[in-house]
Amino acid sequence: MSTQWIADRTKSFDSSGIRKVFDLAAKLKDPINLSIGQPDFDVPEPIKDAMIDAVRSGKNGYALTQGMPVLRDKLLSQVREELPGHADRDLFVASGTSGGLMLAIMSLVNPGDEVLVFDPYFVMYDSLVRLAGGVPVLIDTYPDFRLPIDKVREAITPRTKMILFNSPANPTGVTATEEECRAIAAVAAEHDLALVSDEIYRRFCYDEPFVSPARFNDQTIVIDGFSKSHAMTGWRLGFVHGPAPVIQTMLKLQQYTFVCAPQPVQWAGAVALDTSVDEHVIDYRRKRDMMIDALSDKYEISRPGGAFYIFPRAPRGSGSQFVTEAIEHNLLLVPGNIFSRHDTHFRISYAANDETIQRGIEVLRKLS
Ligand code: PMP
């Protein structure tokens, strides 16, 4: 029986929650879809052209494991400019941010190691830690989703190995302040913990400039990518920078797993670095304001400063019950319990066109 072949390590987590939402979504005809975790704009034309040119000019073979110089050199000089004095910092190109996260966790987490994860969290964190045999230690950030630095200190044990940090955050859109970044950077340094900073939404900061904890802790491992900034979710391009020994270990693993990020996509990535997405960021700020202005009097919302998500409290019952109710009204949302041990909230994505957002607002006001 093939089910008996399944390895134990895959049984420590499941993906049934999010699949249920997808299954429900598939049944709806023309749903008001505010559940999507990717930009609603298309890849900018110059980037598409660069990808097509690369394919046509035969840049289709394996890339170097660490990335093609055309992209890696550019990324490295950007990083060196942004984080001066990090002499030990190395960088490689990964197969998406997810690829980078997987390699970071596999390279650093031993069985039994504890990893601090802020609840609510991006779905992958909990599962990847378990896959590595690690123990996710959830730190509750409700109700305002700000960094609870005292709880972080209390959660640290001799088994703590890593802190997984994400700002702007999925699913809350909450963006860490400079003080919060300083604080988490200092705690990691003080306790010799690997601080992994997932910065995939860094371009989407609406109120304050983005701050990375890496500015205050030169050992921070930064994971970033092109999926959200340039709407390249299907192209699988990310990058990781951090202390050289960690990067070298991740590369060793990349060599025998992902091998490399797709070569034509890397040529396009080099062009993406010169392609502004500012107009989209301005547009998403407007969409955020539109949502918040329309819903704040009816829902309890912690005002998000970035990404493209809002994480309100369900007005009654559980988050998943509310999402079921919304789906009955043709509105697709994501229940908070997919990202959390609590089932009290739900995620709205405003990466959608204005008409969809307005239709969604109408239903949400009716359901409040
Ligand atoms: N981190 C976070 C916080 C995300 O929201 C996502 C995508 N939803 C990822 C990582 C993965 O992105 P990628 O497409 O680069 O693998």
Image (cartoon, rainbow, N blue to C red):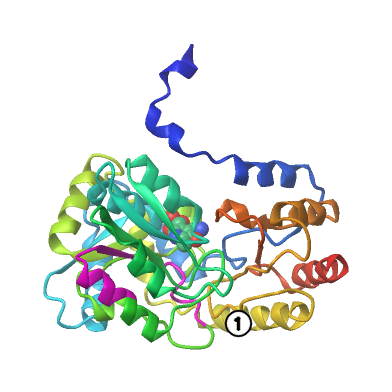
Report whether residue 56 is seen.
no
Q: Position of residue 335 (x, y in %)?
A: 66, 55
In this view of the protein, which residue sits in the foreground, 249 or 272? Answer: 249
Q: Quadrant of the rendered structure where residue 359 is?
A: bottom right
In this view of the protein, which residue sits in the foreground, 192 or 229? Answer: 192
Q: Which residue is the site of mark 1?
A: 285
- Please tell me whether residue 121 is drawn above or below residue 282 in the rendered image: above
- Please tell me whether residue 183 is drawn above or below residue 265 in the rendered image: below
Does the magenta segment cover residue 191? Answer: yes
Does the magenta segment cover residue 129? Answer: no
In this view of the protein, which residue sits in the foreground, 275 or 109? Answer: 109
Region rendered in magenta: 184-205
Q: Quadrant of the rendered structure where residue 166 is?
A: bottom left
Q: Residue at x 49, y 11 (%)?
A: 1
Q: Residue at x 33, y 62 (%)?
A: 163
Report whether residue 341 is seen.
yes
> What type is the residue that disc 1 sits on?
Arg
Which type of secondary structure does the marked residue at label 1 adopt? Answer: helix
Q: Residue at x 35, y 79 (%)?
A: 181
* Badge 1: residue crowd in 10 Å (few <14, some 14–19, many ≥20): many
The quadrant of the picture occupied by the C terminus is bottom right
The reply, left or right, for residue 117 in relation to residue 71 is right
Q: Position of residue 318 (x, y in %)?
A: 72, 55
In this view of the protein, which residue sits in the foreground, 157 or 23? Answer: 157
Q: Position of residue 89 (x, y in %)?
A: 17, 69
Q: Residue furthest right?
A: 366
Q: Does label 1 point to a residue whose CB lies under 8 Å from ligand 1?
A: no
Q: Position of residue 295 (x, y in %)?
A: 76, 77
